[in-house]
Amino acid sequence: MARIRQADVDEVKARTNIADIVGDRVSLKSAGVGSLKGLCPFHDEKSPSFHVRPQVGYYHCFGCGESGDVYSFLQAMDHVTFAEAVERLAGRIGYQLHYEDGGAAPETSGRSRLFAANTAAAEFFREQLLSPEAEIARRFLGERGFDAGAAAHFGVGFAPRGWEGLIKALTAKGFTRDELSAAGLVSTGQRGVYDRFRGRLVWPIRDVTGQTIGFGARKLFDDDQGPKYLNTPETPIYKKNQVLYGLDLAKRDIARGDPRRVVVVEGYTDVMACHLAGVTTAIATCGTAFGAEHIKVLRRVMGDDSGSGEVVFTFDGDEAGQKAALRAFSEDNRFNAQTFVAVAPDGLDPCDMRLQRGDAAVRGLLEQKVPLFEFAIDRRLDGFDLATVEGQVGALRAAAPIVAEIRDRLIRPGYERVLARRLGMDPTVVHAEVERAARGGGKPPQRFEQPVPEPSDAGEGAPVISMATLPRNADTAVERDALIGALQYGHQVDQELLARALGGPFRHPALEAVREAVLAASDRTRPGWSMNAIQVVREPYRKLAGELLMASFPAKDEEGAVASVTGLARRLITRDLDREKNELLGAVQRVPADSDGGRALRMRLRDLDAERQRFVES
């Protein structure tokens, strides 16, 4: 199999901003000079410990220890091979790759073929929307207020009624029936292999990066015996409990919002209506209830560590919609963001509301939002006669477990007062019942558990070498800071000065291991040198090297950072000179002053003093 030339691998990496690639999945904020941070995509966390340094093309999570470059990130997130990661990024920037010995590009993996098949299918469906047979689909869209421009924006298409329209189109492009089956585009039955989607309006479902991974399809013809909505089945690239329709379009406005707001609606047309009405942060689940995995995806996009974000659920006002809201409530404590419910008084969904009352009404729906806990409490009180003592007591017993599940000790008392006002009861009585429910007295099993700490990668009993375990003394501090600066800004400082500063041994063994790797780097002016350097750091110090590469470096701007690194280099050099001087002073005491050795030692001492003075004054 032909390999991609190393020069091309390096060039693609150099031309790619890792922050753009990571930013497709994680909302990143500034974390100091040259550093960005966000919630780690590799493990669930409440506060961001995932850092990205675009200047060095590296990421590192201080929570779980995951680290690497843009290629390893794509490999981990998209489960592609190294070659596929390079090819994907090369295609993104329009770079022509070359292969060793002039060979052809290697065949792509199964996952890449699934992405390609879905992309080709989306194009086929869009083309079919213009066909005469698709008149019913265009009429469906028009009746719901969506013109050709809206259909194009969301990539809406049409699946013809025939059994093999898509199969013939995609096999002509080189896809096999096995690949189409693995992508969920065809089904197998007594007729053999046939198109899964037939005679339906089709929405492409994309991941957060914009790649088509599946489809949702609504039936249009009365003789269609299938379900009203039919989605892609589970495939290696389509996991419905992790997919949110419209997130690829909404993510940038979510990240830019103040506060950062996500609006969760129930269907594809509701997402379209909201976006066209100006609510461009609307998303929807795809054939499944909103759950914990969806929350993880949203939290990374929102970066809701501050708790200032908002998640607004919009549900139909009927019983099913209320149940949906309560299901969402069961996951509420997994959000740091504030959670709300917005239900139109007349039960209209966003699509119907836009049709009947216009765009302003859809935007106004968000102004009617109420806190999700408050909504859940009110639903529990429905059906009780609060004018009677028995009704009040029954309602209190029904609603107290909801308040008891609020883990935030500052928020719970407020909802105890809300419940007391709703019931017209003494707040102390309500508080006592909530505390009883919290202890498990008559309440359902707790649904919310405290996060389980991530296990250490070092193994039981093994020492974990990290920045946090380094000694707190002046020598260690200067060695640590010098390595941080060298790894992050070494390509911008005088190379002779840096080599001289790193020429002497460090006193801490872990930092010494990193110093050796940095000093051994062949070309510290080449992009990516620091990533290669930390890869050769001997264990168990490689994790520490990654932390040093990603650590915050105290400086107001890049110019100040370079000046600080230069200053640290001079401090290391003067420290080495002082160490040599002290050794010589001891030797002078043991050698006769008038001997050749004594005279040579005194001359070296004068040279050391002069050399040190130059570094101090420069």
Image (cartoon, rainbow, N blue to C red):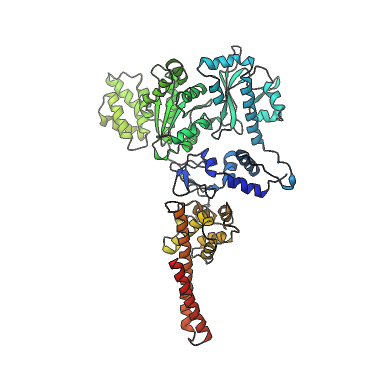
Quarter occupied by residue 425: top left
In the image, is 114 to the left or to the right of 593? right
Where is residue 554? Give x, y as percent.
Answer: 43, 54
**Which quadrant, please, contains the C terminus?**
bottom left
Where is residue 71? Give x, y as percent.
Answer: 59, 45
**Which quadrant, please, contains the N terminus?**
top right
From the viewer's perspective, is residue 418 above or below residue 485?
above
> How many numbered tags mark residues here?
0
Q: Can residue 220 be seen in this view?
A: no
Give me the residue at 49% from left, 88% from top: 594
Q: Is residue 499 visible?
A: yes
Front position in the image: 227 or 368 = 368
Give me the residue at 45% from left, 58% from top: 564
Q: Which residue lies furthest to the top in this view?
A: 222
Quarter occupied by residue 302: top left
Where is residue 421? Give x, y as percent.
Answer: 28, 26
Front position in the image: 492 or 183 = 492
Quarter occupied by residue 560: bottom left
Give me the residue at 62% from left, 49% from top: 10
Where is residue 65? Give x, y as percent.
Answer: 51, 48
Q: Residue furthest front?
A: 618
Front position in the image: 472 or 188 = 472
